[in-house]
Image (cartoon, rainbow, N blue to C red):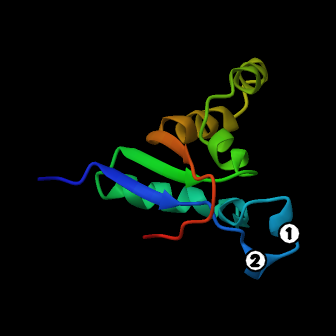
Amino acid sequence: MAVRTAVIPAAGFGTRFLPITKAVPKGMLPRVDRPIRQYAVEEARGAGIDRIILVTSRGKAMSEDYFDLTPELERGLEAKESPRLEELRHISRMADIIAVRQREPLGLG
């Protein structure tokens, strides 16, 4: 039986990286040219996983938005014939991303 779904916990406070994590979720901090969370999704895709469940909390909408479609931005890049357009589309097509909001800190258990 193949594993098809991965769960990525993304609901923590990010206290080790304060004060920046007051504004930017830890998983969305960049490593070179993309957020750390994208590396995790790419690793999962490389293992054959096509559904990612992000367990998020209040203030983590940035993680969800990053993997979502951005039609307005795509149209603008298309009009300019930007080479970044395909990269942007690739991010939203990488996997089926499902966000589940955790109302209170419950740990990984």
Residue at 35% from the left image edge and 44% from the top image edge: 50
Residue 32 lies in quadrant: bottom right
Foreground residue among 74 and 36: 36
Q: Mark 2 points at which residue?
A: 15
In this view, 59 is above or below 35: above
Element carrying mark 1: helix
In this view, 68 is above or below 100: above
Q: What residue type is labelled 1?
A: Ile
Task: Report x, y in % for residue 57.
Answer: 65, 53
Residue at 17% from the left image edge and 53% from the top image edge: 2
Task: Report x, y in % for residue 97.
Answer: 49, 41
The reply to whether dot 2 and dot 1 touch (C-beta < 8 Å) is no
Label 2, label 1: how far apart the Cα atoms are: 9 Å
Task: Report x, y in % for residue 14.
Answer: 72, 72
Q: Earlier in the sequence, mark 2 or mark 1?
A: 2
Residue at 35% from the left image edge and 56% from the top image edge: 46
Image-based side of 82 in relation to 10, left or right: right
Residue at 71% from the left image edge and 68% from the top image edge: 13
Name the quadrant of the C terminus.
bottom left
Q: Which amino acid does label 2 sit on?
A: Thr
Q: Mark 1 points at which residue?
A: 20
Q: Single out the residue that lies furthest toward the right.
A: 19
In this view, 15 is above or below 73: below
Foreground residue among 97 and 12: 12
Element carrying mark 2: helix
In this view, 66 is above or below 38: above
